[in-house]
Structures are given as structure tokens and as C-alpha cells.
Amino acid sequence: ELYTILNRGMIEKKQQTVTGRFPIEAIKIMFELQKKSQPIDIRMQGDESYVELLNIKFSTGKMVRHILDAKIDNKFFNLQKENFHSEEEKYLELKLIDATVVEIFPDKFIRESERLGRVLVERFNANSVFLFGSLVWGKIHNPQTDIDLAVSGLNSGEMYKAIGYLEQITQFPFNLVDINTVPESLRERILTEGKLLYERELVAVG
């Protein structure tokens, strides 16, 4: 599990059972979704997470957990039903079954983006590398999260080679674009709101 987190930045587990205490109002919504045969999707976020290996805790940083396509365990729910309309109870314990659980570790994506940016400058002589998208613009991290990189200074052939090389050295999903060929509105946003990872120092001759 730790290996997967470090090398992919996310873990996906299917057919999972999740038990926890949820607000009654949230449970009511989940119950209505189940009655309509609609999927139950939940997003949770923690500022700190860890993996325990050989009784040693390894910090894995911020973690976003998506519980997807879950179902309420009706037997478990019936045990709590007597408290469903209680004014005293604000939370109830609930068991969700058959869920796909995806855990995303944004810090690992950021670290990998820096490594890939360094490769683009040192190996392919890119002039600059920007990180953009949800990793820097603060949007919700979801199972489709990837590393969005924009480079300058590479021609189309060099871009093709760079993409092929990055595919060989990383298991993280990524998207590499030429900052000079993207739509102008996106280019301006990358330049003003993106994160400059690396910029190669240009030396004047003569």
C-alpha cells in the first residue's frame, strides 16, 4: 500500500465496507438515493494520514477519500432506525457496503510533478515548466486527478519524445502541453496562476 501511494499517488479498492458516524441529514439523503437506486458518493478529506508498516507509522500527508457507488447495509440501518427522528441524536453510525474507495494523496502528486519538471529541463532542455490545474488551483481532487504540466522551448518532435519518456518513468497520470499552443485564455491563466516549477537560465552569447 505504501509503495502504491509513493508511486501512483492514489489507491483504489473495490467491494469495500465502510462504517462511520454520519450526520442524520446526510443519512436521510443517502437513504433517498438508495430508494431511487441511485449511487451514493461521499467525499472526505484529512490534513494528515499515515500508513503503518511493521508497527512504524509513515506519514502520507493530506488525503482525500472518495467513497463511490456505495449502498446502505439495510440490516445495519434498521438497528439505528429508532433514532432516525430523534432530536437528541445528531449523528448515527452507518455501514456502507459494496463501495469503491479511492484515496488520493495530493502531496505525492506535487512531489512527482517537481521531479517530472526537472526531467523536462535537464534532459530535454525545456525553457520553463509550469504546473497548472486542480493541483495548484485548489479545486476538488477526484479519481481523475492528474499532473498538468505546460512547457516552453520544445518543438513538436521534442514534445513527442518527452511524453514518451515520461510515460516510461512515472506511474502517475499526467498531461503535457506546449504553453504556446494552448488557447490564449488558458495560457494567460497558466502564466498568472500556475506554479513555475523550473526555468532554465538562458546565457547570452556575444
Image: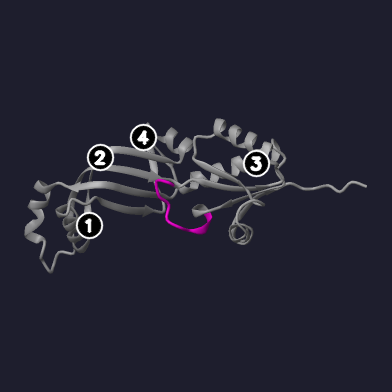
Q: Reading the chain from its start, which is encountered first: label 1 or label 3?
A: 1
Crowd tier of the residue under label 2, counting other residues whose Cα lies within 10 Å: few below 14, some 14–19, many 20 or above? some
Q: Which residue is mark 1?
A: 22
Residue 53 painted magenta: no
Q: Which residue is mark 3?
A: 118
Crowd tier of the residue under label 3, counting other residues whose Cα lies within 10 Å: few below 14, some 14–19, many 20 or above? many
Amino acid tagged 1: Phe
Q: CA distance from mark 1 to mark 4?
A: 30 Å
Q: Residue furthest bottom?
A: 87
Check whether the beta carbons of the residues at disc 1 and disc 3 lie within 8 A of each other.
no
Q: Which residue is mark 2?
A: 16
Q: CA distance from mark 2 to mark 4?
A: 24 Å
Q: Is residue 85 above or below residue 7?
A: below
Image location (x, y in percent) of residue 96: 20, 47
Amino acid tagged 3: Arg
Image location (x, y in percent) of residue 183: 60, 56
Disc 3 secondary structure class:
helix
In front: 177, or 76?
177
Disc 2 secondary structure class:
strand
At x 24% / y 50%, what residue is drawn?
A: 39
Amino acid tagged 4: Asn
In front: 186, or 4?
186
Classify residue 12 as left or right of residue 89.
right
Q: Residue furthest right?
A: 206
Q: Tell me the magenta residue range.
A: 136-144
Image location (x, y in percent) of residue 52: 37, 37
Q: Which residue is mark 4?
A: 55
